[in-house]
Image (tube, rainbow, N blue to C red):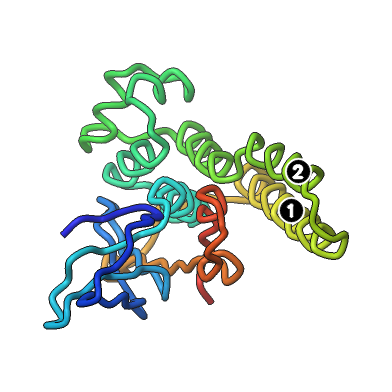
Amino acid sequence: MSTLCNPSKKLSKSQILVTLDEYEPALGAPFKVILHKSVQQIRNDQGDVIETRIPNMAGLLKTVAARRAMCDRKFSPADVKFVRKALCLKGSSLADIIGISAEHMSRCENGDRVLSVSAEKLLRVIAVEARYDTIDFEKSLTSILSDSKNPEDKSEKFKDLILKYRAAVSDLKSAILSLKISTVHSTDDELEFVFSLRESTKDDPDASEAEYEEYSEAA
């Protein structure tokens, strides 16, 4: 069973497309991630699963990493490794960015060492910033300005972009100024995050691949 991102493959007459109420993807995260009404499966007429479709895995990983970064529980070694991989960074590259040696980075991921509070906080800020890529904002703004559709539609897109920008600024401020890393928690308290695609994109057949990055935490 394969996992695809925004596939355009048409269904045969014996196949059906089912949207799952909940799905737990294998992301390699050391905590539970559930996708709510965001994943589709192609099934045959016997009910066997042929494909599982998860829109834009890269966007999902960035969103999950950013959400974990905003949670005050101290990163475990597995958290550090997951966030780094979610951001598509090599251990040596991340080590350079946060100002530690590659060897120390490796030991932190293996559990032999721990990141300092300042290094971990910087990693969290990096994860939050990666979700709100400034290049994406620029591309979105350019797209809206060049859009030939009616002014009312353009106005709604501007409002949506402004909300995203406000969310980005708010999260970055919180990660930099307000977030306090806590080392005290119950070992029985498992972390769980639930996400869903934006309503305006997941059912839109004309939505671009970039728009599918709009995962948000479900209420």
Give percent across and percent down for residue 138: 71, 37
Give the labeled residue for mark 2. 141
Q: Are marks 1 and 2 in contact (CB under 8 Å)?
A: yes
Closer to viewer: mark 1 or mark 2:
2
Residue positioned 80% across, 51% down in the render: 148
User: Alpha carbon of mark 1 to alpha carbon of mark 2: how far?
Assistant: 8 Å
Q: Nearer the viewer, residue 217 or 125?
A: 217
Give the labeled residue for mark 1. 161
Please say if 108 is above or below 69. above
Q: Is residue 11 left or right of residue 181?
A: left
Please say if 120 is above or below 52. above
Total label count?
Answer: 2
Residue flagged by tag 1: what amino acid is it? Leu
Please say if 8 is above or below 108. below
Give percent across and percent down for residue 177: 67, 45
Q: Residues within 10 Å of mark 1 (few under 14, many from 20)?
A: some
Q: Nearer the viewer, residue 12 or 53?
A: 12
**Quadrant (top left/top right/bottom left/bottom right) for the N terminus:** bottom left
Give percent across and percent down for residue 212: 51, 56
Q: Is residue 179 left or right of residue 157?
A: left
Q: Residues within 10 Å of mark 2 (few under 14, many from 20)?
A: some
**Where on the picture, by quarter, is residue 103?**
top left
Residue positioned 42% across, 69% down in the render: 38
Residue flagged by tag 2: what amino acid is it? Leu
Residue positioned 79% across, 57% down in the render: 149
Q: Nearer the viewer, residue 55 or 45?
A: 45
Tag 2 or tag 1, which sits nearer the N-term? 2
Q: Nearer the viewer, residue 77 or 22?
A: 22
Give percent across and percent down for residue 187: 27, 65
